[in-house]
Image: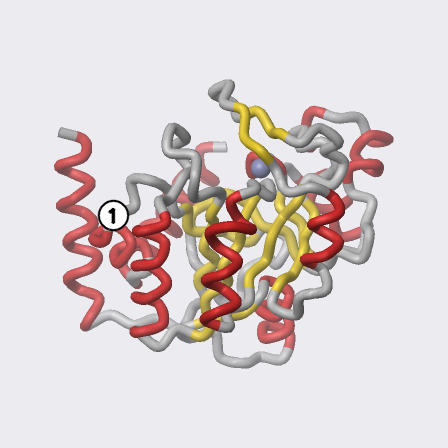
Amino acid sequence: MKQFLKNIFYFKCAFWDFLLHDSKARILMYHSHELPNVFFNVSKEQFVWQLDYLQNHGYHFVTVSRLVEKMNNKESLRNVIAITYDDGHRDFLTTALPEFIERDIPVTLYFPKGMTRDTLVTSTGISCPLISREEIEHLKKNPLIEIGSHGVSHTEFPTVSDEMLAVELAREGEHSIAYPRGKHGAREVREVQKAGYTSAVTTISGFVGHKNDPFIFPRISIDRETNHLAFRAKLSTMFGFYASVRVWISSRKQ
Ligand SMILES: [Zn+2]
């Protein structure tokens, strides 16, 4: 029943999109492509269809730091898309990267740089292979790839002491950071700025306009349930409006 209602909502969002247009950027959040048992996985087939869709609909691709530059320069954000990946799952190298290179699409990859193990265990206990530090260093040389920080140990920032937070936020040239599991509060936002980052992404749903705080960037989550209809809907103006209303309501409850 819940899925049925969701589909009706997605259908409405996608249907009205030919009438409604906004001038906000979208930041898409991906994780992996070869972990079929994990919720955040997007199959290669779906992923390729999504890239085709974006390219066929005139979207303009940027890294997250380039998006910040556009905001600072007061450039238009209309049809701007920033594709992001969290965690550095190994299949980024084998499935996603060849597509980005072939299509000349820039992408921002957030990596928990202190992961000395070669796997990351999800909140549901699934062990996922990660890109190695050496491979990250190699990726940094690719002009299409922006490497962002995802903290050091992937620990949720609000749970650590001030001293540990400083360690988690240490920069190695990164300009953007993704809060692990999206968790952040006023202290984390303040300290991220102090550490010298120019942006931080969350898991809050929504689009990015000129008035958005670059240290609390919302994103659109793309997961295994994001079928063709849902993908179209998640990019739509109506979906962005709905997401901002939800954020406003939850901020009033706090
Ligand atoms: Zn993560």
Which quadrant holds residue 154?
Answer: top right
**Quarter of the render that holds ligand 1:** top right
In-image side of 44 versus 129 (left or right): left
Which residue is pictured at 67% across the width and 49% down the height? Answer: 177
Q: How is the image coloured?
A: secondary structure
In-image side of 109 versus 16 (left or right): right
- Vertical placement of residue 237 versus 118, above or below: below
Q: Secondary structure at mark 1?
A: loop
Task: Pick whichever, 221 or 130, lies toward us.
Answer: 130
Neighbour class for label 1 at 10 Å: few (<14), some, many (≥20)? Answer: some
Which residue is pictured at 75% across the width and 36% down the height? Answer: 152
Task: Pick whichever, 77 or 122, lies toward us.
Answer: 122
Task: Pick whichever, 166 or 148, lies toward us.
Answer: 148
Which residue is pictured at 29% across the width and 40% down the height? Answer: 225
Residue wearing tag 1 = 227
Rendered location of residue 139, percent (x, y): 68, 57
Which residue is pictured at 71% across the width and 60% down the height? Answer: 140
Rendered location of residue 207, percent (x, y): 43, 59
In-image side of 202 versus 226 (left or right): right
Rendered location of residue 199, percent (x, y): 66, 57
Label 1 sits on what residue type?
A: Asn
In-image side of 27 versus 229 (left or right): right
- Vertical placement of residue 150 versus 210, above or below: above
Looking at the rendered image, the quarter that the N terminus falls into is: top left
Q: Residue furthest top?
A: 125
Which quadrant holds residue 16?
Answer: bottom left
Rendered location of residue 180, percent (x, y): 62, 36
Which quadrant holds residue 4?
Answer: top left
